[in-house]
Image: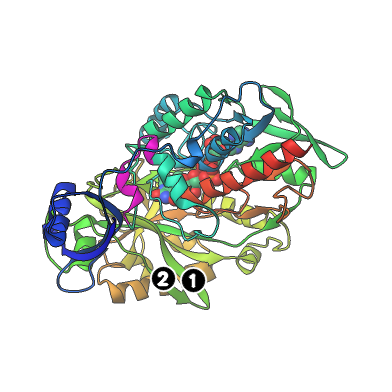
């Protein structure tokens, strides 16, 4: 017999998995059976901070089962399906293809995780940017050295649990199955990506690194071949999962007449505080007790009719240089699994659309105007901060008061932050919305936009600026039968989990197409 349970447990009583188990058993009054935790969420609203824990008491330990997504078969002799890009969308597409009995051939412009890590060190320490191997490009895509937060609002897009179970089976911590805000951490992700690679290779799939897609051959409206720097691959079907940083791919598709649409997205800067200050806002205490996790925030405001919000908050995190071309600056954030850095950062962004793009003289009807807008800001940021990977920054209070030229507080951004006037960077309407948002944040959390809060610009890669159109039923491009635009770059996902879910959907559609033809 299974016994469902739900308890609020004071935070100090449930510090660590053993203490949590003891606290649950005390309440259930049993030492018998297996505790299956299904949800664990922190409730910090009241005076007493507590965990909500929900689950079931099972008579015995359930048997270990291979997750459905990893029930692969030998595909060495099976028909092939190309997957371009080895980010979460591409890798999960490859897993699903193997499950469906097809042979994935993954083409990836960047390097394997280990070789890629060396390029990240060169980027952060010596400002040397490799346009094929950086925070966004290479094995595992933008997900490999990401923060590894695994929550998504897109629960209608697929089976989130199946993705999480596959990750746990491949070595991710089991708590991602029940934590309300699951997080893996940058230090643990690379090994996980390597295990996904091993899985694909073991079943007979292929991964080709240093293989950048440069063109497509389309004949009579059907995909015929993929053209790469290393050669031509005849291909009847391909999942295109190249992510939203691959500007060259968008431009190549546009030149070929593949239907694209301009898409709104969000843009702004990273805001950085000490983790200590964030803990004070959330927990209302001077020093965070060891039994509480580093605090988190999630802000949402309206300003001049548009959304302004925090994005990808990284408690105990680092601001990372995420450009993909020399001459541009892009920021994003990550944190290790223990979230034990002294800083906390988050994107602070506002929605931008055609009306903003036209401020720069761009034609809002043009499918690439959002991309041009993004590139303009990323390049200008680089020029303002000296042309290398140092980023322009300003104290939040000074930005709100139009005061520039002051020294900056210390920052986690290793390439360095250069004091600049960020009003020179952002078009006026965008800046005004962000200013209104910051003022609202300051009211809620005093100091959020204070002298010690640092703005590091720009945060531009929140989601794709372009949609690669696909037919809703077949998931294929109307411009090239057999081409499946997929993941964040195609404009159908935002974040690791939703990209993975879209990869699975596209793989199922591609498998259907491959077996029908
Ligand atoms: C620092 C950082 C932190 C992040 N933190 C989080 C987080 O905590 N939680 C979260 O949900 N999301 C996070 N993200 C975002 C997340 O990583 C992306 O949403 C996700 O990786 C998108 O998956 P994707 O597979 O669609 O594209 P990508 O991950 O962008 O993968 C695209 C792949 O295609 C390859 N590629 C591109 N062009 C070509 C070409 N021409 N030929 C061959 N290959 C090509 C690239 O090298 C890359 O491997 C973070 C991103 C960064 C950079």
Left or right of 363, for residue 352: left
Nearer the observer, 287 or 435: 287
Nearer the observer, 493 or 331: 493
Question: Mark 1 — residue?
Answer: 307
Which quadrant does the N terminus fall into?
A: bottom left
Identified at 37% across, 49% down, the residue is: 418
Q: Are marks 2 and 1 in contact (CB under 8 Å)?
A: yes
At numbered mark 1, what does the secondary structure look like: helix, strand or loop? strand
Left or right of 106, for residue 30: left
Q: Point out the stretch of residues depicted in magenta.
A: 168-179
Residue 100 figure quarter: top right
Left or right of 68, for residue 225: right
At numbered mark 2, what does the secondary structure look like: helix, strand or loop? strand
In percent of width and height, residue 59 lies at: 25, 49
Respond yes or no on whether mark 1 lies under 8 Å from ligand 1: no
Residue 78 figure quarter: top right
Question: Mark 2 — residue?
Answer: 300
Is residue 326 at all visible to an observer of this figure? no
**Label 2 vs label 1: CA separation?**
7 Å
Instruction: Tell me if mark 1 has few (under 14), some (14-19) or many (20+) residues whose alpha carbon lies within 10 angstroms of its own.
Output: some
């Amino acid at each position: 017999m299974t016994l469902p349970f739900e308890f609020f447990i004071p935070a100090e009583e449930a510090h660590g998995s053993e203490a949590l188990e003891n606290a649950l058993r005390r309440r259930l009054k049993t030492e018998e059976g297996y505790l299956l935790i299904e949800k664990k969420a922190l409730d910090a609203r009241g005076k007493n901070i507590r965990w909500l824990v929900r689950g079931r008491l099972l008579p015995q330990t359930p048997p270990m089962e291979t997750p459905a997504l990893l029930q692969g078969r030998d595909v060495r002799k099976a028909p092939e399906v190309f997957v371009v890009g080895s980010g979460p969308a591409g890798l999960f597409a490859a897993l699903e293809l193997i499950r469906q009995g097809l042979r994935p051939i993954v083409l990836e412009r960047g390097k394997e995780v280990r070789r890629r890590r060396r390029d990240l060190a060169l980027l952060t320490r010596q400002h040397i940017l490799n346009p094929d191997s950086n925070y966004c490009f290479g094995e595992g895509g933008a997900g490999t050295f990401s923060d590894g937060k695994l929550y998504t609002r897109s629960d209608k897009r697929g089976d989130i649990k199946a993705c999480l179970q596959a990750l746990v089976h491949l070595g991710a911590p089991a708590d991602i199955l029940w934590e309300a805000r699951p997080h893996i951490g940058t230090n643990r992700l690379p090994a996980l990506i390597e295990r996904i690679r091993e899985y694909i290779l073991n079943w007979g799939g292929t991964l080709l690194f240093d293989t950048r897609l440069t063109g497509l051959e389309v004949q009579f409206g059907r995909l015929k071949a993929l053209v790469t720097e290393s050669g031509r691959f005849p291909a009847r079907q391909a999942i295109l999962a190249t992510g939203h940083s691959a500007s060259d791919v968008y431009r190549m598709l546009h030149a070929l007449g593949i239907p694209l649409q301009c898409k709104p997205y969000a843009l702004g800067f990273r805001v950085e505080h000490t983790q200590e200050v964030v803990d004070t806002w959330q927990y209302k205490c001077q020093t965070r007790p060891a039994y509480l996790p580093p605090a988190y925030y999630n802000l949402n405001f309206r300003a001049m009719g548009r959304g302004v919000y925090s994005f990808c908050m990284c408690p105990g995190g680092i601001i990372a240089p995420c450009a993909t071309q020399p001459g541009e600056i892009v920021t994003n954030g990550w944190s290790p699994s223990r979230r034990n850095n002294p800083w906390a950062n988050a994107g602070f962004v506002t929605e931008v659309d055609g009306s903003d793009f036209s401020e720069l003289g761009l034609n809002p009807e043009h499918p690439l105007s959002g991309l041009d807008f993004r590139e303009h800001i990323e390049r200008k940021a680089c020029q303002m901060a000296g042309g290398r990977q140092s980023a322009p920054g300003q104290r939040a209070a000074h930005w709100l008061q139009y005061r520039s030229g002051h020294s900056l507080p210390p920052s986690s951004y290793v390439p360095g932050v250069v004091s600049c006037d960020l009003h020179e960077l952002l078009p006026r309407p965008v800046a005004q919305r962000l200013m209104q948002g910051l003022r609202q944040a300051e009211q809620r959390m005093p100091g959020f936009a204070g002298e010690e809060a640092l703005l590091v610009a720009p945060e531009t890669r929140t989601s794709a600026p372009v949609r690669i159109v696909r037919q809703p039923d077949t998931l294929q491009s109307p411009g090239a039968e057999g081409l499946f635009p997929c993941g964040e770059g195609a404009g159908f996902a935002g974040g690791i989990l939703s990209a993975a879910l879209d990869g699975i959907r596209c793989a199922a559609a591609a498998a259907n197409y491959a077996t029908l033809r």
